[in-house]
Amino acid sequence: MLKKYFKKDEWFSNIKNDILAGLVVALALIPEAIAFSIIAGVDPKVGLYASFCIAVVIAFVGGRPGMISAATGAMALVMVTLVKEYGLDYLLAATLLTGVLQIVAGYLKLGRFMSFVPRAVVVGFVNALAILIFMAQLPELINVTWHVYALTLGGLGIIYLFPYIPKIGKLVPSPLVTIISLTLLVYFLGIDVRTVGDMGALPDTLPMFLLPNIPLNFETLMIILPYSISLAIVGLLESLMTATIVDDLTDTSSDKNVECRGQGIANIASGFMGGMAGCAMIGQSVINIKSGGRTRLSTLCAGIFLLLMVLFLSDILVVIPMAALVAVMIMVSIGTFDWGSVKKLKTLPLSTNLVMLTTVVVTVYTHNLAHGVFSGVLLASLFFANKISHFMYCESVYNDDRTVKTYKFVGQVFFNSADKFYAQFDFKEVLDKVIIDLTRAHFWDISAVYALDKAVIKLRREGCEVEIIGQNQASLTIIDRFGIHDKPEMIEKVMGGH
Amino acid sequence: MEKKILVCLDGSKLSRAVCDYGIFLSKELDLPLVLLHVVEHTHTPSKLDLSGNLALGARDNLLEELVSEEMDESKKLIAKGRAVLKEFEAYAKEHGVQKCETLHRHGALEEILEELASSLQTAIIGLRGEDHNAIGSNVEELIRNLNIPILLVNDDFKPIKSVLIAYDGSNFAEKALKGISKNPLLPHVKRFIANVNTDVASSAKLLLEAKKFFDEENLEVHTKSLQGDSIEALLDFAQENDIDIIAMGAYSHNRLRSKIFGSFTTKMFLKATKPLLLFRQGL
């Protein structure tokens, strides 16, 4: 137990950098937690409590050291209608159920199904997320005075230009400089713009244990279950994708199933402490790595610093203009966007681009990343099936007096190529005998067997003898229990025709 | 399959002694010698950037930056490792080792050793550095995960002529002892078995039982009952009798207990001035 939850290297191998990175991340978490609470339609304190609880708990139970989890936009978008129709208590209950579902997913080792999500869908997911975060800022930018535009642009200017100042530029987080300078400007010039205080209650105490005030019955379950399922899926998808990004950046590995369970535990903690459901954050995790954070300590520090700052600075937080938060969130959206994928659009195959764009479009349209990912995976699978079905052809030879014809099939026969298989036969031809040679063909499913049967029946009805060669070898691939085929010699036997 | 003797070389001052012990055991047992250098990546960032902002293409840029940074570091480590391996391969051949191979791997020492363990007779590691606590926990983790004997080297090489076997009569130690007597790693040495116990009678009984294992295999042993603080008593005895290495079962208790009370094994290798041969399980 002790070993499992406390590996020294995962905590204290990088102390100074981790504490500093934790501080930078905490500073960036505050505007995000507030902004995502607003998206979800709850008080900012719900997102702030959630971010604290999730970051602190995941530091101990997560499977990916150095990854940052907190209240996120992806999750907030899923819960909007639940909050609107039923209120906060149902959201807290849904958060708890989400946690339970994620823990179950972890124990069932569902993390392995991430291998079904192709790269193009991951890219689409990330881009859709960036677009959604940006779109969520639009309400703050529509029907407002010119001051808001000026402040937002000024804020973005500081964020991107401040780091170029020699020495201090790389020592002080530029989003923090933006928030402080815009706040001072608005406060002392008395500009009348919306501030964080206008958006709802901020935390005034430490988070406290509370049970959601809901009737414990079947009806409640039916209300929250669909949301919890969506939240659990979206949370795990984003967490596992982010974990892969952190794996790549740090050249280390992570335990995806432990991460699934950890996300569940963190969400349950958040739900009991009055927080909304959350998951791993791509933008924040990148900021953490960039700032030098590598271990669990940086995640823990981010959570603790977040809570301390929120508690001691709540009087200041209320006067922060929303324009400053919008500027920070636009930065997060820009940083989350996979810019490389846009540049690669020209060189990648059309099918890959379509999968990526479908994921983006469906997600942006439904505001649910799970729907986008399912559409992307489905489309990618169809494209794959289509590609594979090209890998089948047929040669035919006759005997000397053209009364016996041999069809030699080579390649993959399955649902998508079964019709093509059937179409290879010339049923109009008058023959005494047809030999179907399947030695080098692979029958993957019942559709293939059915197509063969159909062809044989039709040939026989036309008065033709039919002989099939090599059907046993061709059918080896139908067997579902691939476990026994995993050995190289078995694969050789099954695929031997090639 | 023929088992091998592995020496872990890092290019520090102890590497020569570690290699010498490897050569000694390789000749003694007529087993091939494997020289291992592990390229351990630190993965700690070297540049300080707390600007906390994300520009377009931030992830790709960051990855590019980290990759080039670590590539430089790795190249240096690889070059250093190659030089060390080359030097000691020549050294081993010079000292008459016929079958000697080198192994250069990326990763952490403990994971590489775990991968190799099944093909090894024993592994020889130098104890380095000043920070005793850090060494303690690293070595503990390393030894706990391996079930081959580990020779920890902490000083210059001396041919092994005598060995002191520390025996506390526990099931764990008894198993280790049975293993040693059946399949001695050091067939041609003078053996002492020592037990530290205030109760002289039960100590004598334990030692008599221990001696039996060796008698059955026609191996000669001397036994000695010691009193006082166990670590001090064992080390003093080793000093007085000019013992070359101390053999003992390692980490018989679980991690929690060793975290709270401190482990006998850890204390032993932090204090010992002789190389320690540690057994996780009987051979």
Image (cartoon, coloured by chain):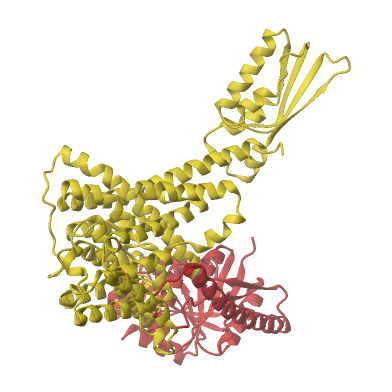
Chain colours: A yellow, B red
Q: Which quadrant of the figure has residue A19?
A: bottom left
Q: Which quadrant of the figure has residue A432?
A: top right
- The reply, left or right, for residue A369 in relation to residue B158 is left
Q: Nearer the viewer, residue B190 or B1?
A: B1
- The reply, left or right, for residue B87 in relation to residue B207 is right
- Residue B224 in view (yes/no): no
Residue found at x 58% / y 74%: B187
Which quadrant of the figure contains the N terminus of chain B? bottom right
- Residue A377 in view (yes/no): yes
Residue found at x 52% / y 89%: B155
Residue found at x 31% / y 76%: B201
Q: Nearer the viewer, residue A483 or A440?
A: A440
Q: Is residue A232 above or below residue A388?
A: below
Q: Where is residue B115 shown, x and y percent of the image?
A: 54, 64
Q: Where is residue A18 shown, x and y percent of the image?
A: 36, 78
Farthest residue toward the bottom?
B240
Q: Where is residue A254 shown, x and y percent of the image?
A: 43, 62
Q: How many marks?
A: 0
Farthest residue toward the front?
A146
Residue found at x 28% / y 78%: A182
Q: Where is residue B238 shown, x and y percent of the image?
A: 45, 87
- The reply, left or right, for residue B152 in relation to residue A136 is right
Q: Nearer the viewer, residue B206 or B155?
A: B155
